[in-house]
Amino acid sequence: MCCGPAIQPGLIGNWRMTLVEGGIAGRVINVPADSAVILTFSSDSTYRVQHGFSVGESGTFHVTDTPVFSIPQPVIVFSSGIVPLGIQPQVYRISRDTLFLGEDFDDGFQSVYLKIN
């Protein structure tokens, strides 16, 4: 039996990116609905990113609570990275139907996703 945090049941499914924010300038980039970026998490620990009608990144993921910058938080580690956030572990939080996925430092970027089914 594996040790460590379980995947939150609410994480599994399809998520549409709505916003990217952050960086040293505090930029906010709204993602138009007709430029859909869909992030899908499956219960077999695989993920894929779909950009419109084409599949982008895909691979496996795992969840850990290993401290990032000495602060224990739930983190998703992607095997192949994820645009626009890259390959480093991503801190995540789910609030109702919204997934916040981002870098764990002050000037880092965060992507915001809405659950779709």
Image (tube, rainbow, N blue to C red):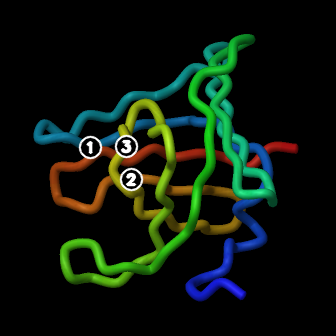
Q: Which residue type carries mark 3?
A: Ile
Mark 3 vs mark 1, CA separation in Å: 17 Å
Identify which amino acid the numbered label 2 is placed on: Gly
Taking the image as shown, residue 49 lies to the left or right of residue 102, namely: right
Q: Name the N-terminal-most of marks 3 and 1.
A: 1
Indicate the quadrant where residue 91 lies. bottom left
Looking at marks 2 and 3 on the same chain, the residue that comes earlier in the sequence is marked by 3
Which quadrant holds residue 14? top right
| Residue drawn at 16 percent across, 50 percent down | 107
Question: Which residue lies under the disc numbered 3?
Answer: 87
The reply, left or right, for residue 68 in relation to residue 38 is left
**Left or right position of 24 against 51:** left
Q: Is residue 88 above or below residue 64?
A: above
Q: Is residue 32 above or below residue 69?
A: above
Q: Are marks 3 and 1 in contact (CB under 8 Å)?
A: no
Single out the mark in the foreground, 2 or 3: 3
Secondary element at image label 2? strand
Pick whichever, 87 or 91, lies toward us: 87
The count of marks equals 3
Q: Quadrant of the N terminus?
A: bottom right
Where is residue 79 drawn, in percent x and y?
50, 46
| Residue to which mark 2 is pinned | 102
Residue under numbered circle 1: 22
- Tags 2 and 1 touching, CB below 8 Å: yes
